[in-house]
Amino acid sequence: MRALRSVFLPALILIGCTGGASDGNAAAQAQSQAQAQSSQRPFQVEEIASFDEPWAMTFLPGGNQALITEKRGRLLLWTRAESDGATATAAVEVGGVPSVDYGGQGGLGDVALHPQFAQNGLVYLSYAEAGEGGRAAAVGRGRLVLGQGAPRIENFQVIWRQVPRFSGRGHYGHRILFSPDGRYLYLSSGDRQQFTPAQDMASNAGKILRLDPDGGVPANNPFVERGGVAAQIWSLGHRNPLGIAFAPDGRLWETEMGPEGGDEFNLIERGSNYGYPIVSDGDHYDGRTIPDHSTRPEFNAPEITWTPVISPSSMIFYSGSLFPQWRGSALIGALSGQALLRVEIDGNSARVADRWDMGQRIREVEQAPDGSVYLLEDERNGSGGRLLRLTPP
């Protein structure tokens, strides 16, 4: 696979909504600036709500409700209603959520619906948990009950854990994704800032994993004959994979945070080794160098690397009708990059087509059933992270 270093594009937009109470002159200046640049925007931004350290969201069937996770441990049922041209939103807490180990990068993480959610009501959650020997990412599932008193998850059961546990609170990964046919459950599992687990077949950290929806191991996984957690592995040699998504052609792509430089956008292939920490297009934070991917062609090289880093946080492939020019492109949220990126795919190669400055750390990107795009901001200096809706101007 060919590696391509991204070229940073000039910021094309500035977000045009202010968050909460702020200096009136600053707000007026921001509004004026936004109006002056509106002709350059491919979208307009609507501020919907604000949450406490939001991490992920997924829409329920119908598109007017979504489940939103907050890192401290709350799962919220968010509702949007339109009446006489006005929009009203509300969020209520969902009961039955497991206790989480909050701190560092740990807490309540991703949320996803079973492919047959309309029939079985199953919701999947990832989170950090503490136990004997340290902390681990975990994934569980339970049935979402609505319309019978307060919303709640019943019969929640853990179906997967990182092995082994580690003492730190970093690089959990724990993104949840179902295959397009609904048969398989894919999980991203970070290296927990320990480096070596990414190459250790006795650990499921630093890997992309492929499971059955109940947590079992498919018989056709690439390392199933080795048994143990190695049987779960789909690909290895990853650092902190925080975005996984299937392209329209059914191929799996991933974004992950590199060390000091070298964030990656990868085409994920069955049984492939992506080289970390043996190779990377970045270096260790303590100044130690890491050989570049080009020095070890036996490892699968990224299609795009970013230096300086953008800290990719999440990813979707856009399939809606509101932005036909985006259809088939990957939309990637950036934390340190404070941006939304659009990546075009051409066979095995990829390129950054657009990079829009959002002015805040973007934690989550999600497509609504109507084709609009929703962004969750990371926590903003203790003032909460906003939920933003992107629509055509």
Image (cartoon, rainbow, N blue to C red):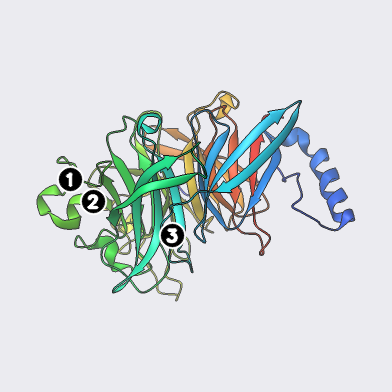
**Quarter of the C terminus within the rendering:** top right
Q: Which of 288/187 is in front?
A: 187
**Quarter of the N terminus within the rendering:** top left
Callout 2 crowding tier (Cα within 10 Å): few <14, some 14–19, many ≥20: many
Q: Which of 149/74 is in front?
A: 149
Q: For the residue marked with disc 3, what is the amino acid?
A: Gly
Q: Position of residue 384 (x, y in %)?
A: 65, 57
Q: Position of residue 102 (x, y in %)?
A: 47, 66
Residue 222: mark: 1
Residue 33: mark: none
Q: For the residue marked with disc 1, what is the amino acid?
A: Pro
Q: Furthest residue to the front?
A: 149
Q: Which residue is mark 2?
A: 233
Q: Are marks 1 and 3 in contact (CB under 8 Å)?
A: no
Residue drawn at point x = 40 percent, y = 50 percent: 125
Residue drawn at point x = 79 percent, y = 42 percent: 34
Q: Are marks 1 and 2 in contact (CB under 8 Å)?
A: yes
Mark nearer the viewer, 3 or 2: 2
Q: Which of 301/192 is in front?
A: 192
Q: Secondary structure at mark 2?
A: strand
Q: Check the image and report above or below for 22 versus 114.
A: below
Q: Secondary structure at mark 1?
A: loop
Q: Position of residue 90 (x, y in %)?
A: 64, 43
State the image quarter where residue 269 is shown. Answer: top left
Q: Position of residue 70 (x, y in %)?
A: 53, 55
Q: Are marks 3 and 2 in contact (CB under 8 Å)?
A: no
Residue 258: mark: 3
Q: Check the image and report above or below for 40 versus 23.
A: above
Q: For the residue marked with disc 2, what is the amino acid?
A: Ile
Q: Which of 82/361 is in front?
A: 82
